[in-house]
Amino acid sequence: MTPIRATDPYDWAALLRLIQDAFAFMDSRIDPPSSMHALTPETIAAQARSGEVWAIGTPPLACVFLTPKPGALYIGKLAVAATHRHQGLARSLIDLAETRARALDLPALELQTRIELTENHATFRALGFAETARTAHPGYDRPTSLTFRRPVP
């Protein structure tokens, strides 16, 4: 399946449902709660205007948010429907992010994942990412997130 860039008009509510469903397992595991809880169809549409939102499938089965930052293309809200995991959709979206970073002349991909989500750490390492930092959310005196980067050849 080929990723498409989501732009208006798009079913932003369906994309929100995908993210909520894909991230639901985190609720009992991470502290503080996921920023996913602050998403609305309107904030996803705003992300599509200020950065990029890509989706696979109709209704969406996988998605990713891409945001250019100084020195890297930031990957956010990478989500794959539970029914379609282990089929290469996340890898396809990471490959797309690399293509977009190259087009934007950015030398790296960057993402963050919660410290508790060790299976995500393993997945991102398998996709060529390396941990570069540990950060704490405001009000926390311990690391809550890991930053991963991958060079763009």
Image: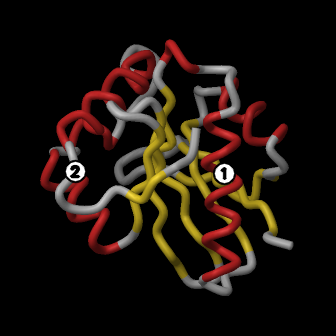
Find numbered disc 1 in the image and state the secondary structure of the residue it sits on: helix
Residue 71 lies, in percent from the top left, at 65, 82
Q: Taking 121 as reference, is 39 left or right? A: left
> In the image, what residue occupies the spot 63% across and 38% down?
90
In percent of the image, x 78 and y 31: which residue is there? Answer: 122
Circle nearer the N terminus (2, 1)? 2
Name the residue that disc number 1 marks. 94
Hey, what amino acid is under mark 2? Tyr
Which quadrant would residue 85 be assigned to in this image?
A: top right
Say whether residue 54 is left or right of residue 101.
left
Q: Quadrant of the N terminus?
A: top right
Between 32 and 48, the one nearer to me in the picture: 48
Q: Quadrant of residue 45?
A: bottom left
Residue 10's disc number: 2
Residue 116 percent coordinates (x, y): 58, 27
Location of residue 106 (image quadrant): bottom right
Residue 129: image tag: none
Q: Which residue type carries mark 1?
A: Ile
Where residue 29 sits in the image (x, y, percent)? 47, 18
Residue plotted at (27% across, 71% down)? 49
Up-down relation of residue 87 to residue 91 (above or below): above
Give the answer, above or below, for where 11 lies relative to 135.
above
